Image (spheres, rainbow, N blue to C red):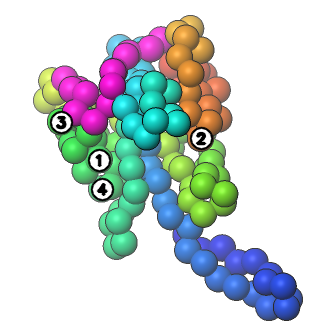
Amino acid sequence: MRTERANGGGQTERRDLKVIVGAAIIRDGRVLACARAAPPEVAGMWEFPGGKVEPGEAETDALVRECAEELAVRVEVGDRVGRNVRMAHGRSVLKVYAARLLHGDEPRALEHEALRWLTADELDSVIWLPADTPIVAALRRLLKTP
């Protein structure tokens, strides 16, 4: 994703935004939340699993790869959830997608401190990372639909 901004001399400067993808893995009306293990300033805060999109990699492919690496699961990626969320002082953007587990896979906390399945009414029972917080409202509506 490219952005443009004017530098001090009024000229336009181009820079690439890093894209971070997250998975709102939904099963039986609950979403998977993951507690960060590191770094220390965010350890114990909750997030949607995911990570950086590598150069030349599609967002959905990155999400499939990240879920396999972080949770040892295979997922099918669905529609976007919520809006783009600017992160890292505007240098990155978070995009969250709904996802579902495949083949009866069960998530394991390979890179996280803990995992929890949350209903719409339980979403506020954890402290979300600031970037994930805007997604929670959209997710609440998605989880409450019959």
Depth order, front residue of 43/93:
43
Callout 2: SS: loop
Depth order, front residue of 78/69:
69
Q: Is residue 46 magenta?
A: no
Q: Is residue 109 magenta?
A: yes
Whichever of labels 2 and 1 marks the residue nearer the N terminus, that label is 1
The residue lying furthest to the top in this view is 121
Q: Position of residue 77 (x, y in %)?
A: 34, 43
Whole-Å distance between the Cαs marked 3 and 1? Answer: 9 Å
Q: Is there any visible trace of residue 64 in the rendered image?
A: no
Number of residues whose C-alpha sits closer than 10 Å to that of mark 4, classed few (under 14), some (14–19) or many (20 or more)? some
Whichever of labels 2 and 4 marks the residue nearer the N terminus, that label is 4
- Residue where numbered disc 1 is placed: 66
Whole-Å distance between the Cαs marked 2 and 3? Answer: 24 Å
- Residue where numbered disc 4 is placed: 61
Whole-Å distance between the Cαs marked 4 and 1? Answer: 9 Å
Whole-Å distance between the Cαs marked 2 and 1? Answer: 18 Å
User: Is residue 95 depicted above or below 134 in this figure?
Assistant: below
Depth order, front residue of 126/83:
126
Q: Is there any visible trace of residue 106 in the rendered image?
A: yes
Callout 1: SS: helix
Give, as a three-letter code, the residue at label 4.
Answer: Asp
Give, as a three-letter code, the residue at label 2.
Answer: Ala
- Residue where numbered disc 2 is placed: 131
**The N terminus - image quarter:** bottom right
Number of residues whose C-alpha sits closer than 10 Å to that of mark 1, classed few (under 14), some (14–19) or many (20 or more)? many
Residue drawn at x 29%, y 47% is 66
Whichever of labels 3 and 4 marks the residue nearer the N terminus, that label is 4
Q: Nearer the viewer, mark 3 or mark 4?
A: 3
